[in-house]
Amino acid sequence: MGDGTLLDHAQRMPIASRAATMVAGILGGSGTHVVQIIIAIVVAAALIVYFLLRVGARGGRGDVRAAAAAVTQHHRAHEGAVSDATVRLVRAWSGIGIGARSEQWNIAIDGIVVGTIANKETVEVDVAPGHHTLRLGSGRHRSVERSFDVAEDEVVGFSCNGPRFWPQLLAAMVKPDLWITLRRE
């Protein structure tokens, strides 16, 4: 039996090595492409997590709409107040964000939603002069909170975009406030 046939070799090979060789064969490799196998597993796991989170996020959308409606009523009640400063927000094209292109993001200044921004849109929001915080988000997808100071008659500019590269997309699935990149211009 020790004549070195392929069958003898397969019988002596450990189970883990046989599984790795089988997976590599399915992916078009020879069994020594460990990096390709790891990348394929990570991408498959990331896609599964993304779609599971996406399905879970759909269940909570009513709460976001109710909160946005309450803030809109609050904003309408204070429309008579005069503000002397402006925040200009420019949303650039989102590269690979699956579903992110059609998703509108809530604009929250000092924790209060004051509007939304769509893909390739520029929005201006009036604010009172002073210190403020800005955060964008929709469901699980959000940005980090940015603090800024604005003076009377000043326009403060920010740009934002969704994930542009797959490593950023994978990181955002683990840490949701990495989904939206928010930069001061």
Image (spheres, grey):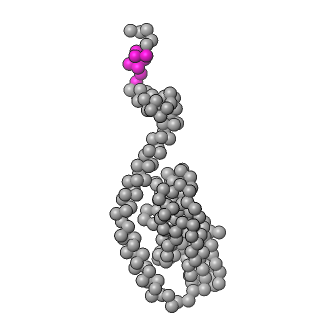
Q: Residue at x 63, y 84 (%)?
A: 152
Quarter in which the C terminus is drawn: bottom right
86 is higher (above) or lower (below) than 172: below
Give yes or no for residue 82 being in the magenta stretch.
Answer: no
48 is higher (above) or lower (below) than 21: below
Residue lying farthest to the bottom in this orientation: 80
Residue lying farthest to the left in this orientation: 59
127 is higher (above) or lower (below) than 120: below
Find residue 94 and report its image quarter.
bottom right
Q: Which secondary structure dominates the residues rendered in magenta?
A: helix
Q: Residue at x 37, y 75 (%)?
A: 66
Q: Which residues are magenta?
A: 6-14
In the rendered image, residue 37, in percent from the top left (x then y), is placed at 48, 36
Q: Is residue 183 in view?
A: yes
Quarter in which the N terminus is drawn: top left
Q: Residue at x 43, y 16 (%)?
A: 6
In the rendered image, residue 21, in percent from the top left (x then y), is placed at 45, 28
